[in-house]
Each structure stands twice: as structure tokens, then as C-alpha cells.
Image: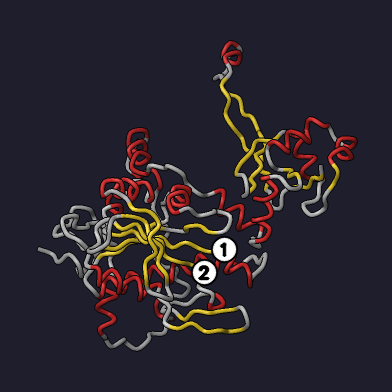
Amino acid sequence: MLLRRCAILMLEPREKLKFELGLIAAGSTGLSHVVEWTAIAPHVGERTVDDDEVLVLGALSPTQWLDREALATRYCAGTIDALLEKQLLVGEGTEADARDRTLRETYWSSLPAVMHYATRWNGVDTEAAERLFVETTRGTLLERLGAAPDAVRERTPPAARMKLPPTARTPLDGILDARVTCRNFDDGVELPLASFAAVLYRAYGARAVQDYAPGVQLLKKAAPSAGGLHATEAYVLARRVEGLDPGLYHYHPVNHALEPIRPLARAEAGDLARRLVATQSYFAGAHALVVPVARFRRTFWKYRNHAKAYRALVLDVGHLSQTMYLAATELGLGAFITAAVNEIDIEQAFGLDPLEEGPLAVTGLGVRGPECNEVEFDPLNAVWPRS
């Protein structure tokens, strides 16, 4: 069998606390500090490795195929077998090789790839974590964290600042003032289909398609995107949208159409919404969740193994979410975005291969509720006038 090291790999020494009864008898707390090596590889996740395995991983090439029998004469055969089982060494033609090749052919840069895959959540419950924090932490959050850094960096004394001319208000200013993250959705009504369609189109819809070169099409959308590639697409969890059965959909930006993926019972859609936004109930109540999913291969096709390519995808999500906010606000709807999401649950729900496509956030929209039961940051009282 021919072997090589996996394409992308990071080794991290992690310190852990280990409890040992024998240490108590010796007069200590019973806790010892142990350092273990953790291998982080996007195609398989995390694996604990020992010192011998670290030496082998550091010596082998990720591009050159080597014969297993020849390797066994240079290194311990048991170490080679352990790394094969952990899929940090891949055998040619194996399933691990296929996953590793997918990662290679998507043209990930190594450090962004490790960061992306190592920070994905699965089944995280943020409300439970908040309750545990309150139960186990003395004092308030502010007392624990201390004062925040200044809201604004000041580089000169006030007298040295150059005043700019005032800005005349336009209708856009009213929309910007009313752009308030919504935490109060009205679950008793449906989101009109026309409004839902308008917001989707204005954020994600293609206004033009251009054949830039043979085999290369570029899209013109309302928001910018690196290289005009627009690799971030919208996946929808519809809960209460007029004329739409609850379920999962993919938005086709050129045809301005929804592609059904899987129908859901209404209760099932609600449960899934909570799971996708890590149980943030005020966001799970949105009438529709819109998940911006990056097609990594689309952007990395041009920006191959590029250190800035992943950052460009993160920028895409910011542009798209703000466009969606403004489109929803103009129609009197509420919208939100959150990065506290269970990416792995999203990938499984929509059938995404995480080496090629992945969610970077969750957004949502819907009809605002009549009362502000959950706190919203609206210092201008543009949405919730003072009584």
C-alpha cells in the first residue's frame, strides 16, 4: 500500500487537568497537569496523538506517496498503523484518501481551513450555557469582565479634529435608523410570500449573468463579492411563510426560485430552527431562517490556496446580511444575523459536504410582534417608540 500524510494538518499541545487519588495521599489536590498532542485535520476532525506519531507526521510528505513496507523499516509499524487508523496517514484509494483529495481539490489554504473546521459547533445549547454561567459565577457579567474598552479610538485632542459638513437626510437614513436586530417575531401570523420573495431577491438574487470567459459566468447582485463570483448562496428553513409548506429549500439566484430539499412538519421545523441557532429562542421564532452557505470551491477556484480567500467569503456574509436587513426594514419586517450557530447540524440538515460547502452564520426575517418582550437595541426608538 502507498501512503502519504494528509494535506492539511495542525498539531497543538494541549494542557489538561487529570485527577489522581494517589496525589491526594501525597498531600496535594489530586490534580496533575498533563500535556497531550492534538492533531487537527479538516477531513477527519481532531485526533489525540503521541510523541512517536508526532515525529512521523513531521517527517512525512503530504505530496509524495511512499510504500508502507518501506516506511515500516524506518518507523515503528505500530505507529504507522495507528496513524492510518486515525486517517492522518492516508492509503491510496481508501475512503480517507477520497476525503483528503476532496479537500486538496477545493484549494483550501491551510490555516483558514483548520480554523474553519475546528470552530464548528454541533448540538451546542447557548441558553443552557448561559444558565450554567449564572449558577456558577459570582457577581454580574460586568463585574467578571471589567470595564469595556472605549467605544471609539481617539487619535487626536478634540481641538485638532476636522469637522465634516452635516449630511442631509434622505429616505435611506430612515431605513438605516430603523435597522434594528429583531428578537420579537409574531408567531400568530404568516410572513407574506411576496415580502419574503422581495427580501431574498434583493439580498441574493442575480440581477444579471455575464459570460465573462469560456466556462466562467459572473453574477451581478446588489452586494459586492470577491471576483464577482458570489459563492455564498441562500438555504432556507421556512416556518411560517404564506403559500410555502414548512421545510428546507435552496434559493436559485438566477431563476429567483426555491428548490425544495425536504418537507417538515411545523413542529419539526420549529425544533430544527432552535437547533440551528443553538437554542436562541428569540431568533428561532423568525418566520424564515436564511442560511448563507459558502461554496468554497467556487471562490477558491480563482483564489487557490490563497491566505485571503476565506476572509473574502466572510466579507460576503456581512454584505449579504446587511442588504437583507435593509430590504426587510424597508418593508417593515424584522431581521437578524447570528454567528452562534450549530454548523454541523446545518450541514446535516441540508445535506452539505463540509469540505466543499459550509454555513458561516444564520440570518432570518419575519413579521415583528406587537410587543417588545425580548430586549432589542433600539436607542433611536425607531422601532419601539417610548410610551
Q: Nearer the viewer, residue 251 or 358?
A: 251
Whichever of labels 2 and 1 marks the residue nearer the N terminus, that label is 2
Which residue appears at 27% of the width and 57% of the height? 245
Q: Is residue 168 above or below residue 253?
A: below
State the scheme by which the image is colored: secondary structure
Circles 2, 1 touching at the beta carbon (< 8 Å): yes
Q: Residue at x 22, y 57 (%)?
A: 184
Image coordinates of residue 115 in percent, x first then y, are: 58, 53
- Residue type, numbered disc 2: Ala
Q: Residue at image x 56%, y 51%?
A: 117
Could you say which disc has been placed on residue 296 in the image?
1
Q: Which residue is mark 2?
A: 231
Position in image of residue 268 (x %, y %): 30, 46
Percent coordinates x, y for residue 224 in the rendering:
47, 77
Q: Position of residue 199 (x, y in %)?
A: 31, 72
Secondary element under disc 1, as helix, strand or loop, is: helix
The answer to whether residue 150 is visible is: no
